[in-house]
Amino acid sequence: MPKDQTASRASSKILWRIAVIITMGSLGFGYDTGVISGALPFMALDASQGGLGLTPVSEGLVACALIFGGAVGALFAGQLSDRYGRLAVLKALALLFAVGALGTAMAPTLWAMVATRFVLGIAVGGASSTVPVLIAELAAPQHRGRLVCQSEVMVVSGQCLAYIASAGLAHLFDSPFIWRYMLAIALIPAALLYIGMHFVPSSPRWLVAKGRVAEAKTTLSGIRDSSREVDHELKEIIAQCDVERRHGGLFNILKEPWLLKLLGIGIGLGFVLQFTGVNAFVYYTPMILKETGMGTNAALVATIGNGVVSVVAALIGMWVINRIGRRTMLLMGLMVVVLAQVFLGVVLNFLPHSLAQSYLALGGVLVFLFFMQMCIGPVYWLLMSELFPTRARGLMNGISVSVFWVFNAIVAFLFPVLLSELGGMTFFLFAVINIGSILFCLLWLPETKGLTLEQIEQHMEQRLGGRKWQGNEAPAY
C-alpha cells in the first residue's frame, strides 16, 4: 500500500475517533430533548403517587424550559468558545449536562424541575452550537461533510434511545418513580463527553487566532495526511487570521455589511429548518395520529418508528453529503417535505376516519422525517459550522443557533393550537411556508462542498460585499 494512502487512512481514523468523542455532546442533546415525551405522563401523576402533579400548563412549562435554555446556551457558548476555545467550553458544558440530568432526576417540585430543565437546556443549546464548529475546524475539507453530519446522527440516535429507553423502562418496572431513572440516564453521555474531551486536540484555527502557531502545527500534523498539507493549510489559516485582526474587535465586525448579510443567511436557515415543522412531528406525532382515530398505545409505538427512521435517514445523509453537495441536498429535501405536507393535508382533510387513513398519515409522517433527517437537518448544522469567518464563528454561530431555538419554541407552541383550530389544513400552511424557504435557498445559499473554511470565507465576503468571486472553484448558485 502506498505511503500516502496509509497516512490518509490513519488520519481519517483519528478524525473519526475524535468526532465520536465530541459528538457525545450531540448524543446528550438528542436524549435530553427526546426523553421528556416518555417522562411527562409519569410526572403528571399526583405527588402522592410519585409524580409532580403537573397540569397541561405546567407540562408546557417543563417542555419549553429546555428550549429557552437552549437559546441562552447557544448564544453565550458561541461567544465563550471564541474567547476560551471550543474545547474548554465543551468541558464546561459536559458538567452542565451532568448537573442538569441529576437535577431533573431528583427535582422535588415543579419549579425545581423547570429550573433544572433550563440548566439542561443551556448545555443542550451550547452543545448544538459548539460541537459542529469544533469538528469542522479539525476536519480536512474532504472529511468535513461526513464528520459534521455525524453530529446530526448522534442527535437523532439520542432521541431514538430516549424513546426506546422510556418505553422499555415503563414496561419492565411498574413504578411511578421510573421517570426519574429515565432522566438520570442522561448522566452517561455527560460523563463520556467530559472524560473524552481530555483526548481531543484544540482547534488549530482558534490556536492561530490566539497566536499559538506552533501548537496549531502540532495539532494539524496529527490529523492531516502529509507535511505538505499541514504547511499549506497552516499558511492559509495564518494569512486569513492576519486579515481578520485588521478588522477590529469581535463586536465591531458585525458592523461590516457583508457580515450582517451573512448573519441574516444563518438566521434564515434556522427558520428554514424549524418551519418545516420537524419538531411538531417529533413532539406531537401521537396527537397527529390520534386525529385519524388511532389508539393511544399504537400512536406511542409509532413514535419509536419516528426515531428509527430518523437514525437511518441521518446515516444515509452522512454517506451522500460529500457526493451530492449541501445546496442540492437541502433543496431536494425541502421539495419532498412540501409534497409530504400536502399529502398529509389531503389525508387528514378529505379521507374518512379509518385504519387506512391512520396508516396513510403515518406513512406521510415517516416520509417527511426521512427526507428531513437525511437532507435538511445534517445540511443545516454543517452550514452553521462552515459559513461564518474564523474571527467571529463562535459569535455568529451562537446568535444564529440561539434564534434557531426561539423558532423551535414558536413552532412547538403554535402547532397544537393550529392543529386544534385548523385540523389538517395546518399542513397546507406549512407547505406554503416551505415553498418560500425553497426560494430563499435558491437565491442566497452557496455550495460549499470541497472548499476549505478560508475559501468559503473569501467567497462569502466577495459575494455579499458585491465583488466578483475570483476563486478556481466558484460555489454554485
Image (tube, grey):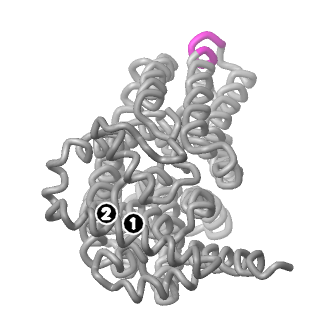
Where are the magenta residues, as a range? 346-351
The numbered disc on residue 130 is 1
Foreground residue, 431 or 448? 448
Q: Does the magenta stretch include residue 347?
A: yes
Tag 1 secondary structure? helix
Nearer to me, 32 or 54: 32
Prevailing secondary structure of the magenta residues? helix
Q: Residue at x 29, y 35 (%)?
A: 466
Instruction: Determine the secondary structure under disc 2.
Output: helix
| Callout 1–callout 2 Cβ contact below 8 Å | yes
Q: Quadrant of residue 315?
A: bottom right
Q: Residue 152, can we see it? A: yes
Image location of residue 260, percent across then percent down: 23, 44
The image quarter containing residue 355 is top right
- Amino acid at pointer 2: Gly
**In screen coordinates, is 340 left or right of 269?**
right
Above or below for 243 versus 204: above
Q: Is residue 104 left or right of residue 179?
A: left
The residue where tag 2 is placed is 394
